Amino acid sequence: MGIAGAVGAQGASKSGASKIRRSEHAALLARHRKVVPSWVGLYYDEPIELVSGKGCWVTDAEGNTYLDLFGGILTTSIGHGVDEFVEAVRAQAGRMVHSSTLYLIRPMVELAERIASLSGIPDAKVFLCNSGTEAVDAALMMCATARRSNQVLAVRNSYHGRSFSAVAVTGNRSWSPSSFSPLVVSWVHAGDAYRGIFAGRTPAELIDAAARDLEELIATTTAGDVACLIAEPIQGVGGFVVPPDGYFGALQRVLSRYGILFVSDEVQTGWGRTGEHFWGYQAHSVEPDLLTFAKGLGNGLAIGGVVGRTPVVDAIPASSISTFGGNPLAAAGALATLQYICDRDLQHHASTVGRRMRHRLEHGAAGLATVGEIRGKGLMIGVDLVVPGTTDPSPVTADAVLDAARVDGVLVGKGGLYGNVLRISPPMTLSAAEADEGVDRLLHAMHAVEQAAAPDQAAARGTGGSLGMDGGR
Ligand SMILES: Cc1ncc(COP(=O)(O)O)c(C=O)c1O
């Protein structure tokens, strides 16, 4: 049972809790386990059902209210119950939900125009679909047909989705259930300066080493005519790993010598979330040929897509269709979301509030031996939890903090190759007061877990390095 109400001093509430059965979650969990595949993971020892939300606050089926710092995996970008969004969806639902792309769809065309002009890609075209996985799959198809090649470069520790092609370019064992692949993939370094073989290098050294490695990778593991490199500007599921600014620009200088296309997977980094830019790629002096998006665009409605250079987008030499892609309902909701983000300059807000959270977090976590690194940009903040005194990942600590934070009335996410990184990525409408409250609750949980684990630290040492199968998303 969540006891968010017990931390009243920090503002959590329990509305009407006395009327609500305490066994709601347990009963639903038992039903879930019977009919939902075992590989659809759930957070928490005692999983919860979120049934309503307002702004950045969500309430579960047992009446506990939480401050949501994960936003449904970076997806509720403007929060719950926003009038402009709700009204746009309601109005469109009343008129027409679906017609299919066999007919002209005004909201789809308007949305495509908007995304094309925001993309920073000259004369761009936009293909709309229903998820990040579909977007990645479509982008890979475009590159493969444009270049007449099934060779692809992808990044270690990446995550791109759950289809065969998306899994093929996902560099994380926890999310790669099969080696069957339509693609031949070579693996580029992630640009991680904290852990791995580039640890401790300066940004300039790291960029130079990675570019030289890429040159060698193309020469030694490919036939030269590679279709594309697909990369996340900041690795999302991978634990908010941030390569140095300019990293992908340096890699693109190598790629361009071979005509290899660059796909920026902005499913997590798009729509201003990184604060300093509207898209993650803009920190890298890189010119993407294609850019994939999803999640935050629909504020929870299923929508994704690809925006890119017309010759690449139009390279598909056969008919293709998405029955639901760009449907009137999702497109109207996405237009309202985008309008809200731009009207209120949520990119700038993400920068300001993100910096505030980061500062408060760094200050409050200064004495914690389990915190290895706090990193990120804007409202993508990662807390890398380690075995004290080492950089060995500690997924056990991450799990414990995730649960303790829930009890303290705050929801955060988890990620990283070893499932040891807390992920903070709230709706971009989070206020300064909510940011402070969320960080304080999280810090309370982190301190409590470290204190409780102190006697066990010696035993935990050395157990953090194995690859768990629950690298959180
Ligand atoms: C960078 C990135 N690409 C693609 C995807 C797949 O998106 P979806 O879950 O909507 O299929 C994700 C999902 O987390 C992602 O983070």
Image (tube, grey):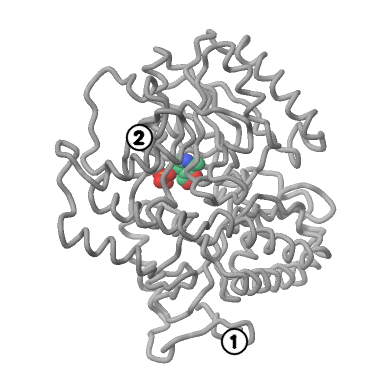
Q: Nearer the viewer, residue 222 or 334?
A: 334
Decide: is 445 above or below 194.
below
Helix, strand or loop at mark 1 = helix
Q: Nearer the viewer, residue 369 or 54?
A: 54
| Residue sitting at x 34%, y 19% | 315
| Other-residue count near label 1 (Cα within 10 Å), few / some / many at <14 / 14–19 / ≥20 | few
Helix, strand or loop at mark 2 = strand
| Residue sitting at x 50%, y 41% | 266
| Other-residue count near label 2 (Cα within 10 Å), few / some / many at <14 / 14–19 / ≥20 | many
Q: Is residue 138 left or right of residue 171?
A: left
Mark nearer the N terminus (1 vs 2):
1
Image-quadrant location for residue 180? top left
User: Which percent across, then down, holds residue 145?
Assistant: 36, 17
Decide: is 230 above or below 109.
above
Name the residue carrying label 2.
126
Name the residue carrying label 1.
8
Amino acid type of the residue that numbered disc 2 sits on in the rendered structure: Val
User: Which percent across, then down, holds residue 29?
Assistant: 39, 67
Amino acid type of the residue that numbered disc 1 sits on in the rendered structure: Gly
User: Which percent across, then down, holds residue 335?
Assistant: 34, 52
Decide: is 289 above or below 322.
above
